[in-house]
Amino acid sequence: MNYEILGSTMPMLELKLSKEERIYAQTGAMQWMDAAINMETEMKGGLFGAIKRSFSGEDMFVVNFSAEEEGATVAFGHTYPGKIIPFDLSNGTVICQRRSFLCAQESVEYDLFIHQKLSSGFFGGEGFIMQKLSGSGMAFIEVDGECVEKELNEGESIKVDTGSVGAFEETVSMNIELVKGFKNMFFGGEGMFLTTLTGPGKVWIQTMPIQCMVGEIYGYMPKSKSN
C-alpha cells in the first residue's frame, strides 16, 4: 500500500492498494474510489466488536475496501478542520482520542483503551475510554486543528490542556492533576484540571479540540427570544 495525504486544513488521504489488498475504515469517510475497488459494510468483530467501537466514539459498522487490480485507489476525507496522522504500528501500539480512527490495514487491531485512574475518566476530557491501535501495518487517525509531535525521554513530563491530547504511544503514562493555585484554577481560563503525560515515548498534541471550537461557535449563534 502506498499513501499520500493531500491538502492542509481539510486533508484527504489517498491510498493505492495492491491487488487483493484490503483495508477497513469508519463509515462515511470515503470520498472517491476506482471502479476496481470493492466496498463491503460489516459489523467487524461481531456484536461485541460493534459495541466496543460505539463506546470509543465510532459507528458500530466499518466499511471494507479491497482492490481487484494492482494500484486501485480509494480516498478518505477528514471530518472537520485538522490533520490526518499516519502510524506504522510495527513500531508499537498507539492510544488515540475517541472518534479519531479513520482507516487501517486489515492487520491492524482496533480496541478500547480504558483509563485505570478514576480521575482520568471524570476530568480528562476524553472520558474513561479511548481508542487503542495495535498489531502491524499502517493506521490513520484524525486530530483537531494542527498537530505537534513531541518525544519524551524516560521520566520527562509535560502538562497538556484537557482535551488537547490527540494520541500517545503505549509507553507513555497519562494522569489528570488539579491546577495549582486558586486564581489559576478559577480565573486562568485553563479549567481546573490538566493532563500530565510522562515518557518515554511520543505524544501528538492537537491545537484545536473540537469541543473547544464548538464552544466558540456557540457564542456567536443567535439566541431564541422567549415570548
Image (spheres, grey):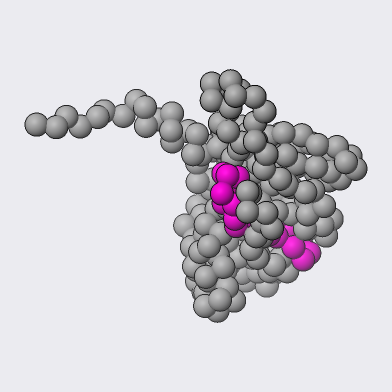
Q: Is residue 218 above or below residue 3?
A: above
The magenta segment: 121-141
x and y, in percent, of residue 146 in the image:
63, 33
Residue 183: which quarter of the image? top right
Q: Inspect the magenta stretch and tell me whether residue 126 lies in it.
A: yes
Q: Inspect the magenta stretch and tell me whether residue 174 lies in it.
A: no
- What residue is shown at x 59% (from left), y 55% (from top)? 128
- What residue is shown at x 77% (from left), y 58% (from top)? 93
x and y, in percent, of residue 118 in the image:
63, 54
x and y, in percent, of residue 112 in the image:
64, 63
Q: Is residue 178 above or below residue 53?
A: above
Decide if residue 197 is on the left or right side of residue 156.
Answer: left
Q: Is residue 37 visible?
A: no
Viewer-proximal residue among 163 and 36 = 163
Q: Is residue 67 above or below residue 81?
A: below
x and y, in percent, of residue 23 in the image:
64, 65
Q: Is residue 219 visible?
A: yes
Viewer-proximal residue among 224 and 73 = 224
